[in-house]
Image (tube, helix red, strand yellow):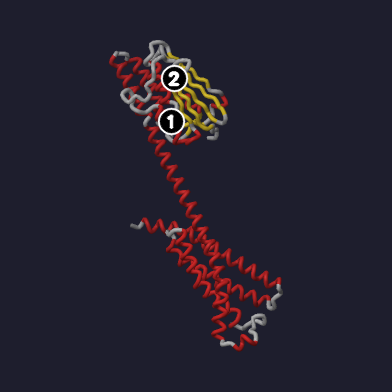
Amino acid sequence: MDFQPSMRAVRRMPDLGIAIKSILAFWLLYMVLITLRGVVIQLPGFWDLLQRRTVATIVGACLTFLVYLALRPMAQASLNRKAVVAGLLCLPASLLFAAANYSIFYLYSPLEAAKLTAEEKAMDPWVMAFQSIIDSSLSWYFLFAAWAALYVAMSYAADLRAADRRAAAFAREAQEAQLRALRYQINPHFLFNTLNSLSALVLSHRTDIAERMLMNLSTFFRTTLTADPTADISLEEEITLQRLYLDIEQVRFPDRLRIETDVPDALKAVRVPVLILQPVVENAIKYGVARSRGAVTVRISAYEEAGRLHLKVKDDGNAPPALFDEEESTGVGLGNVCQRLSARYGNQAGCFHGPDPQGGFTVHLIMPVIRNA
């Protein structure tokens, strides 16, 4: 129950700052302009007028602040409603300021320039004061209305900026959560397949090979599980992680798996999402190597074109891929990679895959070239 009032208080603090700054700037500008006018037309009694204008400016600023206080309960109202209420509040403010201004310049020790004419002296003082206040309040109304329009516009703009910041924060948190969820799908998928292989090795009494595979698996997990799932790593580190994984698979396919990498030195420092290639390489093993009888080469290559990093994973296996066959897979793999790239880079990323014209299967990933750490 205490949370909502706290949130409202936090929201109003920037609004108060906008009000104070705009009021001070508005009335200081008014005082400067009206003083310059007096200098230009050479009104007598400059210093006395300056003192009176200072008092009038303080009164005007105080009345404007009262208008702001009356507008504060409208903080959650629509822009149109705020504008209408602000316009109505300016009416009494302009009347009060006109009365105060009349008192400052005409009632309290009138100056030579402010003395009444013979016709004005013949009038009833109260009638004359009333007419003067009503007449000048119209001019003062537009002054207060100008501030109100400025304040409403500035507060509305501040609300929009705050809403944009909140939306951006929520989008960033949602994106990070999505990246974590997608990233955490990788290890269970990989572990599922690796444990199946280990089980087959143990059942066939190939314990020495199973032990080597366990050691490689331990190294792979020790390296990957300590990484932030939303962080980027260098392409060189990503290739190293894939070699750890392929070392595990080479235990299963010592005579059938060949590995090639082609990564230019200039691209080794480029940042990529951690383990972005692992499901792609795993699919190449599962559908290219495991289903082929002969030797299969898995080739990882990279190049830069038009400010984009292009990563390709190609296998020359002859078995038809079934990358999205729900009966044969856990439902992740390339779908995971494409979703991660989309979540990380939006429309700056690309994800293409299909049979290669030269045989086998190729996955082509595109993402921005980012070299800073």
Q: Which mark is residue 229?
A: none
* Residue 251 in view of the camera: no
User: On the image, numbered disc 2 is attached to which residue?
Assistant: 355
Please state if 27 lies on the left or on the right of 318 as rendered: right
Along the viewing direction, whichever of 290 and 194 lies nearer the viewer: 290
Q: Amino acid at mark 2?
A: Pro
Please state if 119 lies on the left or on the right of 163 as rendered: right
Residue that appears at 44% across and 47% down: 167
Along the viewing direction, whichever of 147 and 85 lies nearer the viewer: 85
Are circles 1 and 2 on residues that touch, CB within 8 Å? no
Q: Quadrant of residue 292?
A: top left
- Quadrant containing the N terminus in the rendered view: bottom left
Residue found at the far bottom of this picture: 122
Q: Horizontal and vertical percent for residue 191?
A: 35, 25
Residue that appears at 50% across and 60% down: 152
Residue that appears at 52% across and 64% down: 148
Q: Label 1 neighbourhood size at 10 Å, few (<14), some (14-19), many (20+)?
A: some
Please state if 110 lies on the left or on the right of 282 as rendered: right
Q: Which mark is residue 338?
A: 1
Mark 1 → mark 2, Cα distance in angstroms: 17 Å
